[in-house]
């Protein structure tokens, strides 16, 4: 019963149009379900930290928004401070009890309060009260705690949405939204919201210029959908049983229902464009049906959604005018794709924000390659409501600032200018060697995946490619590329960098990198079928790719092949056998090629502990620090809830990195690192001291890392490493690296670091 009630309340709150409506639903429904006389929500003001009386059932409604408590005042303050429930049968006798005149709670003796906590921060307090003097029982306390935990995220999202709604009506209202840093840098510009085809919930709000044209488009779309349904009905007349065929009549009746059509027309006449009017009306009806108890009516929500999408797709198809992108466009969408990115003129695109997605998604990789500051996973951002709004994208911290205040704007303008000046200054290092003040060489290679990366990489003095992501050509197609298509792509890369070495990673799909034409549906994709596991199970894919690589290397001999996601030596043995087979077949076919160096990516803990056995079998090792950190710490780095636990400077990660170097060198094999850590200027100090033979990074990081290398003495780094390896936390490591960076005069590069020193 309680579980049903909880689901029903959360669903109703999710459907609320704004924060106040959500809070009003919470207090009325909880009071009803728990059969209590009073239910109240206090919300903490982010600026003053006071707990404001925001919604209530049973007390004086005239004081809502007017009464507040300090962080240490009253029983409500006690709940917030202790971050745990308080359950009392005589509230007025408790030393923390504070009498608030006029609110009307002096008649109520029983008190139960639970904190509302979102991402470790107390957002407010949920309270129920009754006149009779009794302790609420364990079930009631557990229900209120469960309710507050469930509602915390909903309230956080509603508050974020509310700040946007407020900002549209209040000059100077502002808001900030947390996501995941996808590509570093600062972007200042205007939001251009892009939407996938026929997704009702993704349509942005937008004022129309021509009401008559929008009404005409809506009427035409309705007629087109009616015609489609009738045609489909006639086509399937003899193929479906009568009761199933009757569904088409239901659809047509919904289409002819004047009520919802009139609502859409009214919104268009009020100035909303047809797509936005349809989206808002249909979404409202869908929510209403989804919340009904009756199963039949619940299922009608699906029918309405289907019809709404059909009408929307006609509206979108007829909306053929090319979008007018702002001069400084910040592209915003629920889930950005490479094709959306490609539609914006490059000279206008300054930043990107994706509500969903990760720092490893294809669009984030593209953004880094193109040097476009990007925030991914900004899940609380009400993106449909921010068309043309002023935004600042902070690609260092992962924050998106909406309608920034003059002070915030000025701060980020100055950061952006410093970035530009710094980049200009670093250009002078392009042709200088990557070596320390006392002559220690540290080769800097680049990670690539697109031909667009090549010119910039060479321009910035790259000495080779430590990671070429071969999955990107696979992601850009609607089928597996043929052997010849792959050969042409790989040849371009090898030619562009020749005679410098190019390390091609064999196809690394799975996890959060799914091919649209080869979907991998799994409960836990990061511990599932990915990397070498997929290609060994499909030798036809692996052999075609390896043959294409070997053919592409003819006459150049600058190819290196790298195997991803290795967790045991059998996988290496099997892969080596397949590579040799492909090589021998090509020799028989007359190709003049050499067998390239073959290496293994160390990115799971098992590979760390078997690094020496792996090094015996191959020519080199390369650490993928992103995945290694993720697997060592059991933290999905793309999940905003645990992103603050992802520390590449965690002592366990640093010990593993040292262990891999020692194992590789014990077998006389070189070892590099190609994760994000390699492009962190501060981390370069300890990676050099550990003995890494090569650092491979995004080309945007190359000159920054070179600047640090050319400012330090290699002989000083061992004592820094010794100190770092003795401490217990990532924060202590950061503090030591910060001090070292200041000592070598590189503090201006601290904010560029992925480790967040």
Image (cartoon, grey):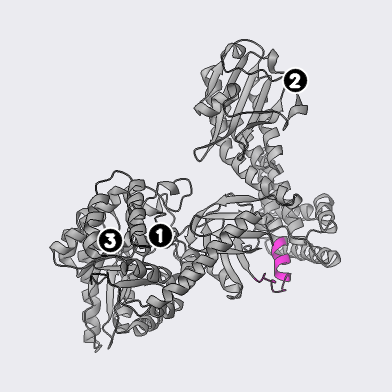
Q: Which residue is mark 2?
A: 102
Q: Where does residue 565 sit, x and y in percent of width and height? A: 31, 60
Q: Which residue is mark 1?
A: 747
Q: Earlier in the sequence, mark 1 or mark 2?
A: 2
Let me know if residue 316 is in the magenta part. yes
Category of crowding for the residue at label 3, using alpha-carbon neighbours closer than 10 angstroms: few (below 14), some (14–19), many (at least 20): many
Q: Where does residue 686 sit, x and y in percent of width and height? A: 28, 58
SS for callout 2: loop
The nearer-to-camera label among 1 and 2 is 1
Identified at 70% across, 33% down, the residue is 24
Q: Which residue is mark 3?
A: 687
**Range drawn in magenta:** 312-327
Q: Where does residue 437 sit, x and y in percent of width and height? A: 27, 70
SS for callout 1: helix
Q: Is residue 478 visible?
A: no
Q: Earlier in the sequence, mark 3 or mark 1?
A: 3
Q: Quadrant of residue 141?
A: top right
SS for callout 3: helix
Q: Are the residues flagged by discs 3 and 1 in contact, CB closer than 8 Å?
A: no
Q: Are the residues flagged by discs 2 and 3 in contact, CB closer than 8 Å?
A: no
Left-right relation of 650 to 595: right
Name the disc covering residue 51, or none: none
CA distance separating discs 3 and 1: 18 Å
Category of crowding for the residue at label 2, using alpha-carbon neighbours closer than 10 angstroms: few (below 14), some (14–19), many (at least 20): few
Let me know if residue 9 is in the magenta part. no
Q: Earlier in the sequence, mark 2 or mark 3?
A: 2
Nearest the viewer among 648 and 469 is 648
Identified at 16% across, 64% down, the residue is 665
């Amino acid at each position: 019963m309680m579980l049903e009630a909880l689901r029903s309340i959360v669903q109703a709150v999710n459907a609320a149009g704004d924060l106040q409506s959500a809070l009003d639903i919470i207090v009325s429904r909880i009071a009803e379900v728990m059969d209590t006389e009073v239910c109240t929500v206090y919300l903490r003001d982010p600026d003053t930290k006071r707990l404001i009386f925001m919604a209530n059932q049973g007390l004086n409604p005239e004081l809502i928004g007017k009464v507040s408590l300090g962080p240490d005042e009253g029983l409500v303050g006690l709940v917030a401070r202790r971050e745990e429930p308080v359950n009392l049968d005589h509230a007025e006798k408790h030393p923390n009890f504070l009498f608030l005149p006029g609110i009307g709670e002096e008649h109520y003796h029983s008190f139960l309060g639970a904190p509302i906590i979102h991402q470790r921060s107390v957002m407010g307090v949920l309270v129920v009260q009754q006149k009779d003097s009794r302790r609420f029982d364990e079930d009631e306390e557990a229900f209120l705690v469960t309710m507050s935990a469930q509602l915390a995220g909903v309230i956080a999202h509603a508050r974020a949405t509310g700040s946007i709604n407020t900002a549209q009506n209040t000059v100077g209202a502002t808001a900030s939204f947390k996501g995941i840093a996808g590509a570093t840098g600062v972007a200042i510009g205007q939001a251009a919201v892009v939407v996938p085809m026929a997704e009702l919930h993704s349509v942005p709000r937008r004022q129309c210029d021509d009401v008559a044209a929008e009404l005409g488009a809506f009427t035409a779309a309705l007629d087109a959908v009616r015609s489609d349904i009738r045609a489909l009905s006639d086509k399937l007349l003899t193929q479906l049983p009568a009761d199933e065929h009757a569904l088409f009549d239901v659809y047509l009746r919904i289409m002819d229902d004047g009520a919802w059509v009139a609502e859409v027309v009214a919104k268009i006449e009020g100035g909303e464009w047809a797509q936005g009017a349809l989206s808002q009306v249909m979404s409202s009806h869908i929510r209403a049906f989804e919340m009904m108890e009756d199963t039949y009516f619940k299922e009608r929500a699906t029918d309405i959604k289907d019809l709404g999408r059909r009408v929307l797709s006609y509206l979108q198809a007829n909306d053929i005018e090319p979008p007018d992108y702002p001069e400084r466009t910040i592209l915003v969408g629920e889930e950005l794709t490479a094709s959306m990115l490609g539609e914006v003129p490059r000279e206008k695109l300054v930043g990107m924000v994706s509500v969903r997605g990760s720092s490893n998604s294809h669009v984030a990789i593209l953004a880094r390659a193109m040097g476009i500051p990007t925030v991914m996973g900004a899940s609380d951002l009400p993106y449909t409501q921010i068309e043309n709004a002023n935004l600042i994208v902070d690609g260092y911290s992962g924050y998106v600032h909406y309608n920034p205040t003059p002070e915030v704007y000025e701060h980020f303008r100055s950061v952006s200018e410093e970035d530009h000046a710094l980049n200009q200054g670093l250009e002078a290092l392009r042709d200088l060697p990557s070596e320390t003040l006392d002559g220690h060489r540290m080769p800097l290679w680049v990670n690539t995946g697109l031909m667009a990366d090549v010119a910039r990489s060479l321009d910035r003095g790259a000495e080779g490619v430590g990671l070429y992501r071969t999955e990107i050509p696979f992601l850009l197609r609607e089928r597996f590329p043929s052997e010849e298509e792959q050969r042409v792509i790989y040849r371009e890369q090898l030619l562009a960098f020749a005679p410098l070495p190019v390390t091609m990673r064999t196809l690394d799909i799975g996890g959060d990198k799914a091919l649209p034409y080869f979907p991998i549906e799994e409960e836990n994709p990061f511990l599932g079928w990915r990397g070498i596991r997929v290609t060994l199970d499909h030798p036809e894919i692996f052999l075609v790719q390896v043959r294409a690589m070997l053919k592409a290397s003819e006459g150049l001999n600058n190819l290196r092949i790298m195997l991803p996601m290795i967790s045991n030596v059998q996988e290496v043995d099997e892969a080596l056998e397949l590579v040799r087979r492909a090589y021998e077949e090509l020799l028989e076919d007359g190709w003049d090629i050499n067998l390239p160096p073959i290496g293994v990516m160390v990115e799971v803990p098992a590979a760390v502990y078997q690094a020496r056995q792996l090094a015996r079998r191959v020519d080199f090792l390369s650490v993928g620090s992103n995945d290694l950190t993720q697997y060592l710490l059991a933290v999905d780095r793309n999940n905003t809830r645990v992103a603050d636990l992802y520390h590449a400077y965690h002592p366990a990660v640093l010990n593993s990195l040292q262990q891999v170097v020692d194992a590789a060198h014990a077998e006389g094999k070189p070892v590099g690192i190609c994760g994000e850590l390699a492009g962190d200027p501060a981390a370069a100090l300890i990676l050099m001291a550990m003995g890494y033979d090569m650092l491979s990074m995004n080309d945007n990081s190359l000159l920054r890392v070179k600047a640090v290398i050319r400012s330090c003495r290699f002989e000083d780094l061992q004592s820094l490493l010794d100190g770092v390896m003795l401490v217990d936390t990532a924060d202590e490591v950061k503090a030591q690296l910060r001090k070292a960076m200041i000592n070598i005069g590189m503090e201006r590069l601290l904010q560029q670091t992925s480790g967040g020193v």
